[in-house]
Amino acid sequence: MSLFRPQFRTFIFARFFFTLAVNMQGTLLAWYLYELTKDALFLGLTGLAEIIPFVLTLFFGGAAADQYRRNKIMLVSMGGFGWIALGLWLFSLGEPAKDEIWILYLLIAGTGVCRGFLSPAQNAILGQLAERSQLARAATWNSAVFQTGQVLGPALGGLLYGYWGPVNSFLCVLLLIVISLTFVLQLKGLPKPASSMIQESLSSRIRSGISFVAAHKLLFPAMCLDMVAVLFGGAVAVLPLFADQILHTGPEGLGWLRAAPAIGSVVSSAILIRFPPAEKAGKRMLLAVGIFGLCNLLFAASTSLALSLLLLYLGGMADSYSMVVRGALLQLCTPDEMKGRVSAVNSIFIGSSNELGAFESGLAARFMGLVPSVMFGSMVTFASTGFAWLKADELVKLDLSKTEH
């Protein structure tokens, strides 16, 4: 990482502490809601509560990231997360009844608004923090740090909830967000994007970002493939039910179940830092998505905590490869003046599918049954991978070592 600019390292620290905090908060909220409701549908509704405001604000966030200083957008958006963390801590101080959980969903909706502006800005800012020749490596480091936060966040969240309770746990989330903000404050002197000088209407900016992705023979199929895999193939939203009903473990076990995929992702990212994806990256990406679906299929049938953790770990390794390839494509194939808008489109495909996937998982588990719903999602993942192999010829032939910078 010494090859990167000092401001890139500052950004990485900010990203780490913030990702740690947000993933802790996700685990805490999942178990907190489950204790209050004992209902899978209420867990699934957390995704719906976040995805609606996220989608409604995301394209505005993408346009803003190509118009204003991206570090300032990050500061304001992450500050919003801080206020939400404060609200969750204050809520946990009382003894809420089940009919008061609408307050939690309101706070979750607030995270959707903040994410809509934060996601494009923090993805687009990489081009201003690393040399162009280092963009692929910067994207890999960014992914590795993000996944590390996803490892430690759920594990710490589950352990803190189990031993310290929700009040102290939500307070720790708030403190971590404050730490991340101190690093963002050090990102000074970054210029406005080049496109900020172009006089263009908001609607025109948004349309140009959508058109760029829709016409791209690599970005569009890669985003579609990951969207389907995350939307139908994941089981993160219903892990509290697997922990309680199938594996018979508590919040500590849930923390490790939430962390297992990210541990696999960190290991995979570490390997990819040393051996970046290059030749046959497209074919290997499709194979990785298929392995991800297979691991989730076997996880649904498992009744052993150790086997379930192993399968989630392997699935995380496979998912990380796909994430790194897609991140490298976004950085290498997108002009800097459009990275905010293209990142917004990417977040629609990938980021929003996490929340829609949470809603789909909760809804499917409610009406199809827990195990059959996850198996069904795995089958959809297999089908989408096969379709991409047959139809997305440019993606199948992708060789990152030959991709133009």
Image (cartoon, rainbow, N blue to C red):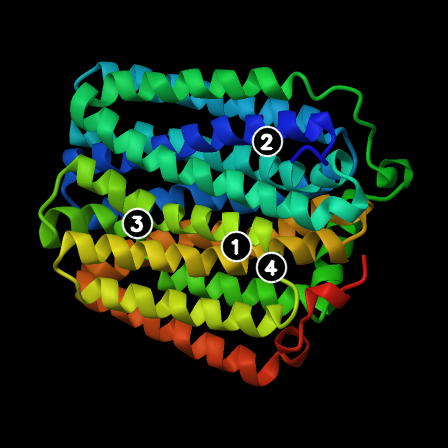
Residues at badges 2 and 1 in contact (C-beta under 8 Å)? Answer: no
* Above/below status of 233 relative to 95: below
SS at circle 1: loop
Of the two numbered discs 2 and 1 on the same chain, state the one appearing first in sequence: 2
Please tell me whether mark 2 or mark 3 is closer to you in this view: 2
Residue 341 in the figure: left or right of residue 115: right
Mark 4 lies on residue = 325
For disc 2, the marked residue is: 12
**Total residue callouts:** 4
Amino acid type shown at disc 2: Ile
Q: Are marks 4 and 1 in contact (CB under 8 Å)?
A: no
Q: Secondary structure at mark 2?
A: helix
Amino acid on which disc 3 is placed:
Ala
Q: Nearer the viewer, mark 2 or mark 1?
A: 2
The alpha-carbon separation of the residues under discs 3 and 4 comes to 25 Å
Classify 10 Å Cα crowding around label 2: few (below 14), some (14-19), many (20 and above).
many
Mark 4 or mark 3, which is nearer the start of the sequence?
A: 3
